[in-house]
C-alpha cells in the first residue's frame, strides 16, 4: 500500500505540471509570432553589426529585455561605460517597477518559481499572467511559470536563429517591430471584452493621452504609469464594488 501511494505522488505532480503547461501554451501563441519576428530581427541586427551569433543567444538568455538588447548593440560598439548602461537600462525598463507591484499578490506562494517569474517578467508575460483567466484545477504558479518560460524560449530561439542565418537574409526587415504593437492591441481588446464595464480601461487610455500631450511621445510612458497607478489605487474600492477589479 505504501509503495502504491508513494508511486502516485510523482504521477500527480507530473499531471499537475502537464495540465498547467497545456493551459498556458495557447495564451502564448500570439507572443510566439511577435517574438520570433522581433527576435530574428534582433539577431540579424547583431549579425550585421559585426557580432557572432552567440552574442544574441547569450543576451537573450541572461538579459531578456528586448528594448535593452537592441540598445545594448550600440553600447557594445561604443566606449566602455557601465554607469551609462545602468542608467539607460533603468530608464528603459522602469515600467517593470509597476508590473512588480501589480504582481505581488499573484506571485505569493509560488515557491522557487517566484525567482524565475521575477527575472523573466516582460511586457507580454505580465499582460498574460495578470489578465488571463486560469482554469479551475490548474496550478497558478506553474501556469505563470510556463507562460514566462515559453515566452523566453520564443525570444531566445528567434534571436539565435537571426544571429546564425542573418547574413543569408537579404529582404528588408523595416517595420517588423509593428508586430508587437498589433499584439498589444489584441491583448487590450481581449481584456476589454472580458470587462462588464470599461471604467479602468477608459481611465488608462485617457490618462495616457493626457500624458502624451504633456510630456511628448518619448517621455510619456513613465508619467502615465505613475498617474494610472495613483488613480486606480485611489478608486480601487469603488471599482471593486462595481465589479471592475477582481
Image (tube, rainbow, N blue to C red):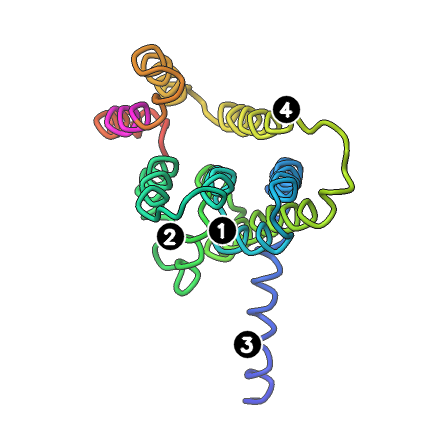
Image location of residue 31, percent across then percent down: 60, 39
Query: Which badge, 3 or 1, comes first in the chain's sequence?
Result: 3
Question: Residues under labels 2 and 4: Cα distance?
Answer: 35 Å
For the residue carrying disc 2, how many other residues have a C-alpha within 10 Å: few (<14), some (14-19), or many (20+)?
Answer: some
Residue 18: numbered disc: none
Q: Is residue 126 magenta?
A: no
Question: Residues under labels 3 and 2: Cα distance?
Answer: 24 Å
**Measuring 61% from the left and 56% from the top, which residue is drawn there?**
54
Question: Does residue 229 sit above or below 42 in this rendering?
Answer: above
Q: Which residue is mark 3?
A: 9
- Does residue 124 appear anywhere in the picture? no
Quadrant of image for the N terminus: bottom right
Q: Secondary structure at mark 3?
A: helix
- Point out the residue furthest to the left here: 234
Stretch in magenta: 223-231
Question: Residues under labels 4 and 1: Cα distance?
Answer: 30 Å
Horizontal placement of 197 versus 59: left or right? left
Horizontal placement of 244 versus 20: left or right? left
Q: Is the C-beta separation of discs 1 and 2 under 8 Å?
A: yes
Image location of residue 49, percent across then percent down: 60, 41
Q: Secondary structure at mark 1?
A: helix
Residue 107: numbered disc: 2
Query: Which badge, 4 or 1, comes first in the chain's sequence?
Result: 1
3 or 4: mark nearer the eye = 4
Residue 144: numbered disc: 1
Question: Residues under labels 3 and 1: Cα distance?
Answer: 22 Å
For the residue carrying disc 3, how many other residues have a C-alpha within 10 Å: few (<14), some (14-19), or many (20+)?
Answer: few
Amino acid at each position: 500500500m505504501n509503495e502504491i501511494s508513494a508511486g502516485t505522488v510523482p504521477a500527480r505532480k507530473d499531471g499537475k505540471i502537464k495540465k498547467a503547461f497545456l493551459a498556458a501554451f495557447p495564451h502564448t501563441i500570439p507572443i510566439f509570432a511577435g517574438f520570433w519576428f522581433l527576435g530574428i530581427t534582433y539577431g540579424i541586427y547583431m549579425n550585421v553589426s559585426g557580432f557572432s551569433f552567440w552574442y544574441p543567444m547569450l543576451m537573450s538568455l541572461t538579459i531578456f529585455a528586448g528594448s535593452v538588447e537592441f540598445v545594448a548593440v550600440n553600447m557594445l560598439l561604443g566606449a566602455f561605460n557601465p554607469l551609462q548602461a545602468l542608467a539607460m537600462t533603468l530608464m528603459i525598463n522602469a515600467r517593470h517597477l509597476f508590473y512588480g507591484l501589480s504582481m505581488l499578490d499573484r506571485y505569493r506562494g509560488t515557491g522557487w518559481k517566484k525567482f524565475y517569474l521575477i527575472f523573466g517578467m516582460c511586457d507580454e508575460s505580465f499582460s498574460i499572467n495578470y489578465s488571463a483567466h486560469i482554469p479551475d484545477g490548474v496550478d497558478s504558479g506553474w501556469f505563470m511559470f510556463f507562460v514566462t518560460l515559453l515566452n523566453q524560449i520564443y525570444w531566445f530561439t528567434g534571436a539565435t536563429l537571426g544571429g546564425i542565418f542573418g547574413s543569408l537574409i537579404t529582404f528588408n526587415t523595416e517595420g517588423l517591430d509593428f508586430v508587437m504593437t498589433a499584439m498589444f492591441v489584441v491583448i487590450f481588446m481581449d481584456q476589454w471584452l472580458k470587462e462588464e464595464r470599461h471604467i479602468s480601461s477608459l481611465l488608462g487610455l485617457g490618462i495616457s493621452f493626457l500624458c502624451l500631450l504633456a510630456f511628448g511621445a518619448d517621455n510619456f510612458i513613465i508619467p502615465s504609469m505613475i498617474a494610472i497607478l495613483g488613480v486606480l489605487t485611489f478608486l480601487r474600492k469603488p471599482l471593486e464594488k462595481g465589479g471592475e477589479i477582481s
